[in-house]
Image (cartoon, grey):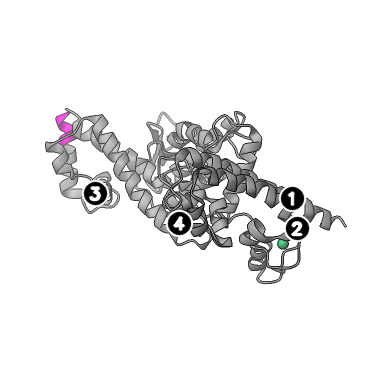
Amino acid sequence: MGGKVVKTSDCSEHLGIKRTDGKEHNFNIKERIQTARRTKYALMGSGVHGTNGLNPAISYQIYKTYVIPRLTYGLEVLPLTKSNIEELEIFHRKNLRHLQSLPERTSNAVVLLLLGALPIEAEIHKRHLSLLYSIVSCDNSKIKDVMIRQIATNYDNKKSFFSRILNILEMYDLPSINYLQKNLPKRDIWKEEIKKKVNQYWNAQLKSEARNKTSLKNMNIENLEIGKTAQVWNLQNQPRLELRKAIIKARMMTGAYILQSDKHKFTHFVAEPLCQLCNTENEDIIHMVTSCPVLSTIREKYYVEMKMEILDSIDPIKWNTFCCNKMEITQLILDCNNFKETLNISSELMTKIEEKCRNLLFQLHAKRIEVLDALNNK
Ligand SMILES: [Zn+2]
């Protein structure tokens, strides 16, 4: 044009979303993750990170407000592939692990459940459903015509928004578009309905995944819930030391705290499973919590405190019936929700027991590290 070559671009930006004729979703995913990562780094200065940071429940609220919207912005209009979603989930879970100081090996489902968090796929579905509401409730007849035509012609085209939305409505057992056109609820009622159905679906999914993990056998999975923070992070206005104790407890209850018997498995039986402290038994969580003689002084002291707290309010007969072997006692200490029903523990008492157990486990951990360090420095 005018003697100059006009460059053509295969990429343009519309409303913050890159549109290309090729794999635009891959482009956008990378950009979303970069933006979200920058946002997360910016927030770290205010304590949104694991150890020595804020309580994970508060960090998650901040993350949910500032990072998730940037990570998912506009993604409801793009035909994302399974691998695109997985890329986002990996980033999301990594952040949630970091907020809770949980190591890589912690089971995916429990990383979400402890914070009551949804996977990113669910967050994107919520955006889909909100956009659908805007389209159905809009007065513009042209938009409505486009919708009707799209549903009629594109219902089996996986790249079409309407084909995706039909699947999403079915997945969460929500009313059909047809029904919504005739009986559109108020926006806040629709929002509530979405929240309820999406939470219900993922509660079932994540819990069933968690129930199959042997690393989580000492936890009460049933008590966890999307939208609710797990008791282990229930630490209002408490000093940082309490958070450090809670982190140790969270690692132990999720099977992410490494003991000698875990090392034995990870090293394909090269490392000895024998407890390095006492050399009398294999070191697993039951041994550490209930049996290791080297930890017995510490255990006596803090275990008695915890037991007294329970026996102050609970019938000793009940205690003797339900908490009589080492495995049961370990499960009580790791997650007292395991005995909420059988011992009929009130919420107020649960908070007290949680605090005592958190302390007991931390003191055992501190002593164990102290003894191991002394042995290694010999
Ligand atoms: Zn031992």
For the N terminus, which image quadrant? top left
Q: Label 4 amino acid?
A: Ala
Q: Secondary structure at mark 3?
A: loop
Closer mark to the observer between disc 1 and disc 2 = 2
Considering only order in the chain, which callout, 4 or 2, is on the residue closer to the N terminus?
A: 4
Q: Label 2 amino acid?
A: Val
Q: Label 1 amino acid?
A: Lys
Q: Which residue is mark 3?
A: 173
Q: Is mark 1 within 8 Å of ligand 1?
A: no
Q: Nearer the viewer, residue 45 or 135?
A: 45
**366 relative position to 144: left or right:** right
Q: Secondary structure at mark 2?
A: helix
| x and y percentages locating residue 308 in the rendered image | 59, 45
Q: Which residue is mark 1?
A: 367
Magenta segment includes 141 = yes
Considering only order in the chain, which callout, 1 or 4, is on the residue closer to the N terminus?
A: 4
Q: CA distance from mark 3 to mark 1?
A: 52 Å
User: Which residue sits at x=56%, y=56%?
Assistant: 329
Tag 1–tag 2 contact (CB < 8 Å): yes
| x and y percentages locating residue 377 in the rendered image | 86, 55
Q: Which residues are magenta?
A: 140-144
User: Which residue sits at x=32%, y=39%?
Assistant: 195
Magenta segment includes 258 = no
Q: CA distance from mark 4 to mark 3?
A: 23 Å
Tag 2–tag 4 contact (CB < 8 Å): no
Q: Residues within 10 Å of mark 2 (few under 14, many from 20)?
A: some
Q: Is mark 2 within 8 Å of ligand 1?
A: yes
Q: CA distance from mark 2 to mark 4?
A: 33 Å
Rendered-image quarter of ligand 1: bottom right
